[in-house]
Image (spheres, rainbow, N blue to C red):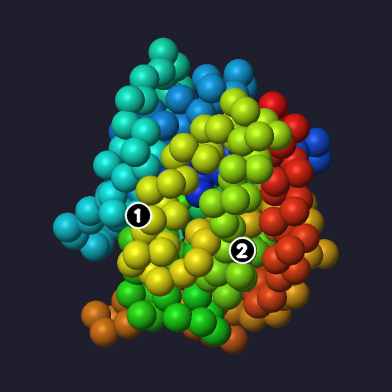
Amino acid sequence: MKIIIDTDPGVDDAMAIFYAHAAPDIELVGLTTVFGNVWVEQATRNANYLMEFLGADCPVAQGASEPYEITGFKPSAHVHGPEGFGDHVEIETARAPIVESAAEFLVRMARENPGEIVVCAVSPLTNIADAIRLDSDFAANVGRIVIMGGAVDVPGNIRDCAEANIFHDPHAAAEVFASGAKITLVGLDVTMQTLCLREDFTALAEAAPKAGGFLLKISEFYHNFYETVAGKTGCAMHDATAVIAATHMELFTTESSGLTVDLSDTALGKTTRAPSNPPVEICLDIDADAVKARFFDVVARLG
Ligand code: BDR
Ligand code: CA
């Protein structure tokens, strides 16, 4: 499966990118970057850093630097660290982004490969809405958009009622859900079931010292957030779960329903069912043990 990851790396974004690079059933054909966990320039640098680290040659296209309408955006440094990779702050890369913007790259790739490109959007949806605005055929040309975002029957994370990726650009998300593109929503309903322990990453680092050692190092800060702020034992691999959903839907239980995003001040970013919108596949349950096992098995192959 040809996959583009739209990303704001980000600790769990790095996990998703490592998984996609290692998975035998995925051809990672590009990364597009957006503000979110970090500023977009940091996201682009981090994406290029990961490609260099992995020895991958896929392009990185930079996208949006701010939401459509919300003002005062601030990166989630308390979750992902000041540079996006926890305490790992010396991040240098010789790689540069391509000249095309994220939206231009998404539009061209979907046009050149009609029905084949799966976009895993694991960050605010501004680039995806930009692609829809740029090309009225994008929603039809793209194979599927698998979105890590939303909280349908469970509480949010950045607000009681809202998940972070949707909250950071709710207006863009609303446009994407209304677009008619084939969409799978992989929200907190399922990703909060994928809590991983420090021991899981320690074992991964033993099996795969380079890749696993890197994930062990950058996830320490993320673990601390989950334990001390979120009050959880273990950290969620939100974004990797969305990439796994792209190829292994049999590990998820879904409901088909229209979806909308609340744009009111009191419930900004809340995702709710809306029968009047085009149906999307909403993941409501997950075989979390199988998803976690698949993640650690596949990433261990990186060595
Ligand atoms: C989402 O928000 C970001 O912090 C993570 O990378 C993930 O994409 C989880 O709500
Ligand atoms: Ca992310």
Judge whether 265 appears above or below 139 on screen: below
User: Mark 2 = which residue?
Assistant: 194
Dot 2 alpha-carbon crowd within 10 angstroms: few under 14, some 14 to 19, many 20 or more: many
Judge whether 4 appears above or below 49 on screen: below
- Residue 79 is marked as 1
Residue 111 in view:
no
Say which residue appears at 74% left-offset and 41% top-offset.
Answer: 298
Q: Residue 61: x, y in percent?
A: 46, 31
Amino acid type for the residue under numbered disc 2: Thr
Q: Quadrant of residue 175?
A: bottom left
Establish whether ligand 1 lies closer than 8 Å to the Cβ of label 1.
Answer: yes
- Residue 142 is marked as none
Establish whether ligand 1 lies closer than 8 Å to the Cβ of label 2.
Answer: no
Which quadrant, please, contains the N terminus?
top right
Q: Is residue 229 left or right of residue 289?
A: left
Q: Is residue 260 left or right of residue 208?
A: left
SS class of the residue under badge 1? helix
Dot 1 alpha-carbon crowd within 10 angstroms: few under 14, some 14 to 19, many 20 or more: many
Say which residue appears at 35% left-offset and 54% top-offset.
Answer: 79
Say which residue appears at 44% left-offset and 55% top-offset.
Answer: 223
